[in-house]
Amino acid sequence: MKNSVSIIVPCYNQAQFLDDTLQSVFNQTSSNWECIIVNDGSTDNSEGIALKWTEKDSRFKYFFKDNGGLSSARNFGIKKAEYDIVLPLDSDDIISKDLISEVINEFNISNADVVYYEVEFFGKKKGVYTLPKYSYRTLLLQNVFIACTPFKKANYFKIGGYDEKLKSFEDWDLWIRMLNENSKVVKIDKTLYYYRKHKTGSLTNIFSESPKIYFDLYDYIYTKNKTIYDAHFKNPILAYHENESLKTFNNRIKNNFFFKIYQKIKKN
């Protein structure tokens, strides 16, 4: 059904946040949704919280599976989905009460492949979550969406879903394979998603402590999708030299006397 959304909520030992997440789903102004909760082998009270919501509203559906990681849990949930539009939702985040109605409306109007929106932080950090403007070429260089961005289920199945070998960047890899330069991607200029920021355990902290993990992930995604990259970036040697020239130019500008004066005036 094009007028309904399957919300996929993987959860692993985040019982303390799950209730708020499911409450934000229950609060939707649109009734056209189902929420598939996938317990990925949690050892906390995630099951008790999930079952409370399945008893309250039959649109909540609960499944338990052995721990396999986020990609595995999302794949499991999407295979259970009844509707044509899929929204992955992290079990510690919150969605605006209007998200489902806005998303359904945009998919119907534009026939988009992906619909995204403004995102704000909450928790240990507040403010706008700023992401680069979408183009497929930009997407190949860096992720431009949050993982919890709705898409057409049919496109997901065409590419075989999330790569379960990836423990991070799995959503970026999905977008690279799911989209192309002809895909229709539409943005709703409203804040519809609230991303919980934790004090510890973030990817930024993990990558800072172990940069090899970060570079290995990039290498894996590039190698896996090399055919796509080769079609868009013909000559990596030229690209490297262009980048080095640009860095040299930027450094020259920053060291310019008038630029330094401008920066001092700007700070004052």
Image: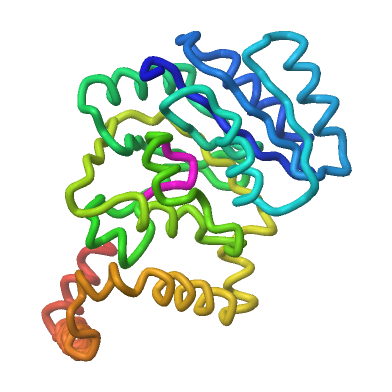
Farthest left residue?
Answer: 258
At 77% across and 11% down in the image, what residue appears? 55
At 59% across and 42% down in the image, what residue appears? 196
- Magenta range is 145-151
Across and down, in percent, residue 199 comes to 67, 54
Q: Is residue 62 left or right of residue 84?
A: right
Query: What secondary structure characterizes most of the magenta part?
Result: loop
Across and down, in percent, residue 26 comes to 60, 15
Q: Is residue 160 above or below residue 54?
A: below
Say if the magenta span includes residue 170: no
The residue lying toward the viewer, choosing from 154 and 64, is: 154
Across and down, in percent, residue 220 comes to 48, 74
Quadrant the C terminus occupies:
bottom left
Counting labels gives 0
Q: Quadrant of residue 15?
A: top right
Say if the magenta span includes residue 148: yes
Quadrant the N terminus occupies:
top left
At 20% across and 66% down in the image, what residue appears? 265
The residue lying toward the viewer, choosing from 209 and 102, is: 102
Give the image's coloring scheme. rainbow
The residue lying toward the viewer, choosing from 246 and 90, is: 90
Q: Quadrant of residue 248?
A: bottom left
Q: Quadrant of residue 242?
A: bottom left
Across and down, in percent, residue 207 comes to 58, 71
